[in-house]
């Protein structure tokens, strides 16, 4: 079941714009997590048959986009997709969606429009790039003002932004408070490796399986109400 989307208002040039944001899990990410899930299921992936059902996910996104526009009166709908191609392209064809910001496949995807549908973009992997999208909202929807440069590279020469450093510190504080019951914090070591575990990008990655399952085990060992999933 799709939870509540987020609605935010932004003021620009004397105009108030309402934006709806929804987060969804793509079939490939659901498949990658299937060995470590028991009762939890995701719309868009058939666990027993081990098959994607992209049409089901697109239908769900379409219903939520319609609700956001009719009941929440938003002018822009953005989908944050834990997925990548071709899932982002499929979601981009759903009526009512304006922008699909993807992640999961580690692709550096310059912003582009899928036919007459929504825009898609993905900012690569491991914090090496940040997406920079400048939009103009008109009668025909969103138009991209910086199509030639929709990513900026990040390396040791990049000057830190004090505003974002403060935001990161604030989020770390919120996370630490939320997991405080477990006596863990973001700097608590959860394991020491004695053998080399190479990093991979699929469900067979030993390192990925170890880190994700160990985090879940440690949290559930220390809290009262068990956690079924985390993202």
Image (tube, helix red, strand yellow):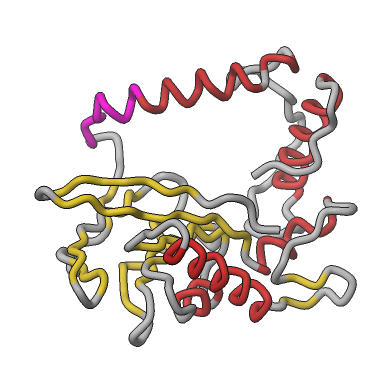
Q: Position of residue 219 (x, y in %)?
A: 77, 27
Asked if the magenta segment contains residue 159, the reply would be yes
**Residue found 23% across the figure and 36% down from its top:** 158
Magenta segment, which residues? 158-166
Q: Position of residue 58 (x, y in %)?
A: 59, 75
Q: How many marks?
A: 0
Q: Residue furthest bottom?
A: 115
Which quadrant would residue 151 be assigned to in this image?
bottom left
Asked if the magenta segment contains residue 67, the reply would be no
Q: Is residue 210 above or below residue 141?
A: above
Front residue of 99 and 169: 99
Q: Position of residue 115 (x, y in %)?
A: 35, 87
Q: Position of residue 14 (x, y in %)?
A: 11, 48
The C terminus: image quadrant: top right
**Residue found 55% across the figure and 65% down from its top:** 64
Front residue of 122 and 14: 14
Front residue of 201 and 36: 36
The N terminus: image quadrant: bottom right
Q: Is residue 60 above or below residue 228?
A: below
Using residue 188 as the reference point, say whether residue 17 is left or right of it.
left
Front residue of 29 and 140: 140
Which quadrant would residue 214 be assigned to in this image?
top right
Q: Is residue 1 above or below residue 177?
A: below
**Residue found 67% across the figure and 69% down from its top:** 27
Using residue 56 as the reference point, say whether residue 118 is left or right of it.
left
Q: Is residue 21 above or below residue 146?
A: above
**Residue found 70% across the figure and 71% down from its top:** 44
Using residue 187 as the reference point, say whether residue 205 is left or right of it.
right
């Amino acid at each position: 079941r799709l939870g509540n989307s987020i609605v935010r208002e932004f003021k620009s040039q004397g105009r108030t714009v309402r934006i709806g944001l929804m987060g969804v899990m793509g079939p490939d990410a659901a498949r990658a997590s299937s060995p470590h899930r028991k009762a939890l299921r995701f719309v868009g992936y058939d666990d027993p048959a081990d098959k994607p059902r992209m049409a089901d996910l697109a239908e769900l996104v379409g219903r939520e986009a319609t609700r956001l526009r009719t009941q929440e009166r938003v002018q822009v709908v953005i989908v944050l997709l834990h997925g990548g191609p071709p899932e982002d392209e499929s979601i981009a064809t759903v009526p009512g969606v304006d922008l699909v910001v993807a992640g999961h496949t580690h692709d550096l995807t310059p912003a582009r429009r899928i036919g007459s549908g929504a825009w898609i973009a993905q900012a690569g992997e491991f914090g090496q790039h940040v997406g920079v999208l400048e939009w103009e909202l008109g009668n025909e929807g969103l138009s991209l003002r910086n199509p030639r440069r929709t990513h900026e590279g990040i390396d040791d020469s990049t000057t830190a932004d004090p505003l974002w450093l403060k935001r990161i510190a604030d989020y770390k504080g919120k996370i630490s408070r939320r997991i405080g019951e477990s006596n863990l914090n973001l700097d608590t070591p959860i394991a020491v490796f004695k053998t080399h575990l190479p990093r991979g990008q699929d469900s067979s990655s030993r390192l990925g399986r170890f880190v994700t399952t160990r985090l879940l085990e440690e949290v559930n060992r220390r809290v009262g109400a068990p956690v079924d999933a985390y993202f």
